[in-house]
Image: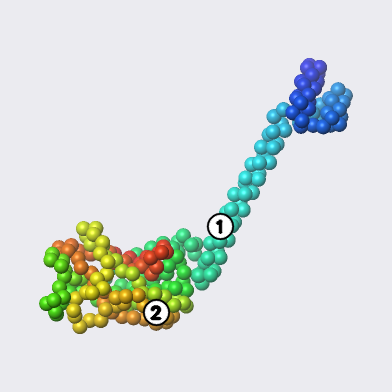
Amino acid sequence: MAKSQTEQLLKELDQLRARGLVTDEEYAARRQAIISGQVQLPAQKSGGGFFKKVGIGCGALVGIFIVIMIIAVAAGGGSDDGSNGSGGSSSSSKSADVRVTLAERAVGEIAPEGNDARKSRVTIVRIMDPVVSSNQFSQPKAGMRWIGFEVIHENVGTREISSLTWKLRDTNDNEHDQDVVGPVVDMPDLDPFYADLTPGGKKQGWIYFQVPEGAGVKWLRADPNTFMKGDLYFEAP
């Protein structure tokens, strides 16, 4: 039995030498150890044992790489939050949309990508449906009507912000951009074109949409930055 084991170990050692995995000096030393009965050393180094150890080493390296990547992502998220002046919330949660019930006196706050330095607060003051123009030459298209929302836009961050981009979806799932012309009424428009708002400042005015007769409002959306995530939705109850 011992002879068979010795022969097997010598054969495996020969294979290691043929593959160039041991030097001539190592081969001679290990062969002498096998012949003298010190069989554990060659057995541990031969055959699959060698590649198994290499495989474990590669697995460990992959594991270390994954851990490094996780740490890097976490550090990156933390850096973004810090630069944005936010607390401890994750970037994924802070970049999510904010949803508020559409109603008079409803209030919502939103910041692009969770950047609290550029946070907007929006208040729905009044809702008028329909809005009737006082000028016969300023009327909605056939089959359409104007819906108006009086809103307050406040800069509650620490850096200058731009005016919001508005969109309305009706109950037929048609979406409408803000009507920058709007009806002729004695009610001031809110930023029909882009304008800046400094920290602590606010503006109040009306935004208008042309909506088909018979269709209701599904939601009203305020977008602080069209190139970034995080919008404010006022959703119909």
Q: Quadrant of the C terminus?
A: bottom left
Query: Residue 165 vs residue 134: left or right?
Result: right
Residue drawn 68% across and 34% down?
Answer: 52
The residue that mark 2 highlights is: 197
185 is higher (above) or lower (below) than 26: below
Residue drawn 29% across and 75% down?
Answer: 192
**Image quadrant assignment for residue 75:** bottom right
What amino acid does circle 1 point to?
A: Val
Q: How is the image coloured?
A: rainbow
Does the CB distance between marks 2 and 1 fall below 8 Å? no
**Classed neighbour count for the residue bearing mark 2: other residues with Cα under 10 Å, few (<14), some (14–19), many (≥20):** some
73 is higher (above) or lower (below) than 233: above
**Image quadrant assignment for residue 175:** bottom left
Residue drawn 44% across and 77% down?
Answer: 160
**SS assignment at label 2:** strand
Image location (x, y in percent) of residue 11: 77, 21
Q: Using the rendered image of the protein, determine whether residue 32 is visible from the camera's viewpoint.
A: yes
Q: Using the rendered image of the protein, determine whether residue 218 is visible from the camera's viewpoint.
A: no
What amino acid does circle 2 point to?
A: Leu
69 is higher (above) or lower (below) than 211: above
Image location (x, y in percent) of residue 115: 46, 69
**Image quadrant assignment for residue 167:** bottom left
The residue that mark 1 highlights is: 73
**Classed neighbour count for the residue bearing mark 1: other residues with Cα under 10 Å, few (<14), some (14–19), many (≥20):** few
Query: Residue 187 vs residue 222: left or right?
Result: left
Image location (x, y in percent) of residue 102: 28, 68
Number of numbered callouts drawn: 2
How much space separates mark 2 and mark 1, taking CA atoms?
A: 33 Å
Earlier-in-chain disc, 2 versus 1:
1
